[in-house]
Image (spheres, grey):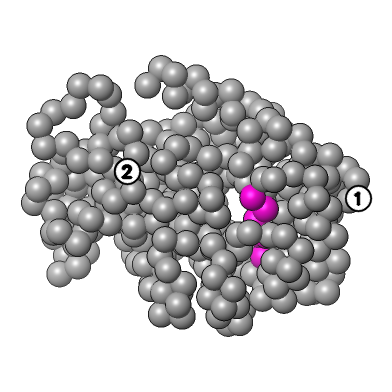
Amino acid sequence: MTEYFRPLVLHGSALPDGAVSLAGQALCFTHAERLSRTEAPAIVTAQDIPADALNRLTRPRSDIAELSMDRPQIMGILNATPDSFSDGGIHNSVETAVAAAKQMAAQGAGILDIGGESTRPGANFVPEDEEIARTEPLIKAIRAETQALISIDTRKASVARAAWNVGAGLINDVSGFTFDPALAPFCAEVNAPVCVMHMQGDPVTMQDDPKYDDVLLDVYDFLEGQVAHLEKLGLNRSKIVVDPGIGFGKAHAHNLTLLQNLSLFHGLGCPILLGVSRKGFIGEIGQEPRKDARAPGSIAVGLAGLAQGVQILRVHDVVETAQALRLWAAVR
């Protein structure tokens, strides 16, 4: 029987006996929920978790491209696309995009995620040469103006290679390295830090009628399989970030189940990235139809993720998130 362990996360200066650190952070746990596909959930002590599983849950995460994973990091979203769901068409010149990148870095974004292909629900495929034309000059210009880590948000090896060659330091693949078979070997070849995201289907079809046997365990198993695949190619697990893919091939109930149980994904032994910024369920539950007015709801969900030990928040609203993060840290 395959077992999964979801830490019941605690924080504070006065901690009970038996508490162990969660991923080397100032969070800990004494108990976990043991899950499986064949037995009812059960609560177990940290000491009852098998040694290899406990090690993955507790060991400190390595820096990602010199960016520390022992405290929360902000990834600012910058799309060089005409049709992204929230910021499409805003950064349609190198000059405006570089100005936005410099502003986000100054506001507290340690990572700038540059995308040249929209992955909103229903988005169409962008040819590789067009995606490169959108992102390569932008990344080159940003690299000259800021020291922030640059991430290329792409599913395609040729786009990743072009971005890497002009200064990108992280490959963020929304397909979880399932779209282009050449992308994972390229990342292993250049020893690039990567983010592996879960997405059911593709942007054109992913929200048609998403179904899972068990969304939490299905997403976990997919990510574990893809991390293992990258390891076999020679990329060390310490260079891999995982993302459960909120809103990518998930109904609202799936999103909420994943968000309520995010600490499970520490069992993969990798930093966790959470991307919820301005998404549809934020607007629906928060009763805000305007995408650019969803910062409060996005921040609320992001802070809930940080309370479960998430290391990276991918956001549109950098300055608002940075302010909230400073206050969240202070009161804790």
Identity of the residue drawn at 61% across and 35% down: 283
Identity of the residue drawn at 66% across and 76% down: 157
**Residue 21: quadrant of the picture:** top left
Identity of the residue drawn at 41% across and 74% down: 231
Q: Position of residue 174 (x, y in %)?
A: 58, 62
Can residue 171 be spotted in the picture? yes
Relative vertical location of residue 308 with respect to residue 254 in this rendering, above or below: above
Magenta highlight: main SS: strand
Question: How many C-alpha atoms fall within 10 Å of the one at disc 2: few (<14), some, or many (≥20)?
Answer: some
Relative vertical location of residue 130 with respect to residue 69 in this rendering, above or below: below
Mark 1 or mark 2, whichever is nearer to me: 2
Identity of the residue drawn at 71% across and 36% down: 104
* Kind of residue indicated by mark 1: Ser
Q: Position of residue 189 (x, y in %)?
A: 57, 78
The dot on residue 66 is none
| Magenta stretch, residue numbers | 149-154
Residue that mark 2 sits on: 24
> Which is more N-terminal, label 2 or label 1?
2
| Label 2 residue SS | loop
Relative vertical location of residue 199 with respect to residue 58 in this rendering, above or below: below
Quarter of the image that includes the N terminus: bottom left
Q: Which residue in the rendered view is the most extreme toward the top?
A: 331
| 198 with respect to 6 (left or right) | right
* Kind of residue indicated by mark 2: Gly
The dot on residue 93 is 1
Can residue 89 be spotted in the picture? no
Q: Position of residue 211 (x, y in %)?
A: 44, 63
> Does the magenta run of residues contain 153?
yes
Q: Nearer the viewer, residue 307 or 254?
A: 307
